[in-house]
Image: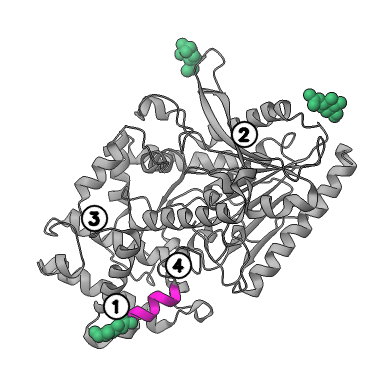
């Protein structure tokens, strides 16, 4: 998720859900970039001094009371608006990245807190950011990383924080989150209805899926969508560029290395696949983060480049796009070594900058899948990419067989309910440009299970700070979230006796 706009919002939380077949695809790099830009913006806008950092001791293994090991989990808190002790608590749940101060200043929690006199708290996900348990990230240790562990942390944090801040038992806790953390927000309500009163789940892919080919179905639909500056011509030109590139690579055209700004030679098929993966990520990011603050290219910008100089050949627009994206990210060239990507995923040293490629890849192999493939006839990218190659990586990096990954994904859906979680008071919010929306709840499942699909908006856009350029649907969508919250907080007054 990477959002964006002139004034942005709670970036940190917008987790990013990268394509994961390589450690650092352009999709993930662009997602990180967007989050960073927005976090900085959020801090500037939100008086960072209002956000206080705190630490909680959490059990490493919350499911084994004989295991005494623990680790420090980071949280942020903003008491500025709180009507102590029984105002509501807005809990911003972190996902697969680090959380900064803007997590309690911006986004729905920050925006809605003044009106409701809410305490705003955010909780960094275990194994990400500064909340990494001591030791290496070997497989023995990663056993303590899962969404279930993260939810156990939420429950225990709620107990600890209630004590630390003397929060009344009648204060309703509302969970918020975007992307994977949006799923966690929904599941926190699902699994702990006695602790979490209601949830707002933005762009939450609650359905785990091994072969996520529908991601690229939405990418092609969005590239052709005039509402965001796309067109059928643009989609066609992207497809033509990729097929030209595919053909050139298989003919072994050496000049492509410099033309496509690849960091290394492209003779080996796996390095060719790596390059194609990066470029697919470049296009995917333009769609996923469409119109967000910090993206170098959105759908309109990409389509403009792709169509502008077609007389120079089908690859020229893509080359222009590569140049722009490399410049934005400060990269000299496009990483194209499969071996280097695998080595990065195998590195068990905890990262010092908050990014958790290895950890998130582990979660895809043990819980979610989400492997993006190109099977749909409309997919504009190389057809060479196979699910099997991505599954092999789980084996190579963690020793997890394809069969175990498939089983893990289906267990996740059994455990959480997939597209029919059966939780009440969860508001699912999605954007139709966002490729992830197809794994989320798009229609209300009942009167207390509302959902909305916002036209013309991308991944977690609703969490960003409002901008004048926002489409009307987004503007209206934010109002609906505030109205729904009002209903639920009134119910809390009646049921919990909060004033
Ligand atoms: C629980 O923790 C104890 C103490 O560390 C350990 O000996 C035991 O094997 C653990 N049990 C399980 C099921 O992991
Ligand atoms: C906690 O809140 C209660 C009211 O709900 C108050 O009586 C008590 O003094 C507070 N304790 C602390 C330590 O602030
Ligand atoms: C198209 O090509 C011309 C000359 O090569 C260049 O000046 C121009 O910036 C290009 N347009 C775009 C949109 O890149």
Q: Which residues are magenta?
A: 299-306
Q: Position of residue 238 (x, y in %)?
A: 33, 75
Residue 33 sits in which quadrant?
bottom left
For image coordinates 34% across by 71% down, the residue present is: 380
For image coordinates 26% across by 62% down, the residue present is: 276
For image coordinates 46% across by 63% down, the residue present is: 294
Q: Secondary structure at mark 3?
A: loop
For image coordinates 42% across by 53% down, the residue present is: 32
Is the residue at mark 1 in contact range of ligand 3, meaning its CB lies under 8 Å from it? yes
Marks 2 & 1, CB-CB < 8 Å contact: no
**The magenta stretch spans residue 305:** yes
Q: Give the residue at mark 4.
A: 287
Q: Give the residue at mark 2.
A: 154
Q: Give the residue at mark 1.
A: 317
Q: Secondary structure at mark 1?
A: helix
Q: Earlier in the sequence, mark 2 or mark 4?
A: 2
Few, some or many residues within 10 Å of mark 1 (<14, 14–19, 20+) = many
Q: Earlier in the sequence, mark 3 or mark 2?
A: 2
Q: Give the residue at mark 3.
A: 335
Q: Is residue 388 left or right of residue 97?
A: left
Q: Secondary structure at mark 4?
A: helix
Question: Which quadrant: the C terminus?
Answer: top right
Compared with residue 130, is residue 252 higher up or lower down, i.e. above or below? Answer: below
Please tell me which residue lies in front, 14 or 141. Answer: 14
**The magenta stretch spans residue 268:** no
């Amino acid at each position: 998720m990477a959002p964006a706009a002139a004034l942005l919002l709670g970036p940190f939380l917008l987790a990013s859900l990268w394509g994961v077949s390589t450690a650092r695809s352009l999709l993930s790099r662009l997602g990180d970039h967007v989050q960073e830009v927005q976090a900085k913006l959020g801090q500037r806008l939100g008086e960072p001094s209002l956000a206080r950092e705190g630490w909680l001791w959490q059990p490493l293994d919350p499911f084994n009371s004989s295991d005494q090991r623990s680790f420090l989990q980071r949280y942020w808190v903003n008491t500025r608006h709180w009507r102590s002790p029984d105002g509501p608590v807005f809990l911003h749940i972190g996902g697969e990245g680090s959380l900064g101060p803007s997590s309690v200043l911006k986004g729905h929690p920050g925006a809605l807190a003044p009106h409701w006199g809410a305490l705003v708290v955010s909780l960094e996900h275990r194994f990400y950011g500064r909340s990494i348990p001591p030791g290496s990230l070997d497989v023995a240790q990663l056993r303590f990383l899962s969404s279930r562990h993260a939810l156990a942390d939420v429950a225990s944090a709620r107990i600890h924080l209630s004590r630390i801040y003397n929060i009344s038992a009648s204060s309703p806790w509302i969970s918020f989150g975007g992307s994977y953390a949006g799923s966690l927000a929904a599941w926190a309500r699902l699994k702990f209805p006695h602790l979490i009163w209601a949830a707002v789940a933005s762009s939450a892919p609650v359905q785990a899926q091994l072969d996520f080919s529908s991601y690229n179905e939405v990418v092609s639909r969005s590239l052709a969508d005039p509402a965001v500056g796309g067109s059928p011509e643009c989609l066609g030109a992207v497809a033509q560029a990729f097929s030209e590139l595919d053909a050139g690579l298989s003919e072994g055209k050496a000049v492509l290395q410099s033309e496509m700004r690849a960091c290394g030679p492209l003779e080996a098929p796996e390095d060719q696949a790596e390059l194609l993966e990066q470029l697919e990520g470049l296009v995917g990011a333009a769609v996923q983060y469409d119109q967000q603050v910090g993206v170098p290219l959105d759908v309109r910008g990409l389509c403009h480049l792709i169509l502008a100089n077609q007389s120079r050949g089908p690859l020229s627009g893509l080359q222009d796009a590569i140049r722009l994206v490399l410049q934005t990210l400060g990269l000299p060239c496009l990483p194209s070594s499969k071996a280097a990507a695998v080595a990065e995923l195998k590195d068990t040293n905890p990262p010092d900058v908050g990014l958790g490629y290895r950890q998130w890849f582990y979660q895809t192999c043990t819980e979610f899948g989400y492997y993006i493939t190109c099977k749909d006839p409309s997919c504009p990218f190389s057809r060479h990419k196979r699910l099997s190659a991505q599954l092999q990586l789980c084996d190579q990096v963690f020793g997890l067989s394809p069969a175990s990954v498939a089983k893990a994904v289906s267990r996740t859906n059994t455990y959480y309910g997939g597209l029919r979680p059966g939780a009440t008071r969860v508001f699912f919010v999605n954007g139709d440009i966002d490729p992830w929306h197809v794994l989320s709840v798009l229609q209300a499942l009942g009167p207390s299970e509302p959902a909305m699909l916002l036209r013309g908006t991308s991944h977690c856009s609703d969490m960003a700070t409002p901008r004048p350029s926002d489409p009307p649907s987004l503007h209206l969508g934010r109002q609906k979230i505030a109205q729904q919250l009002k209903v639920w907080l009134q119910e809390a007054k009646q049921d919990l006796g909060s004033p």
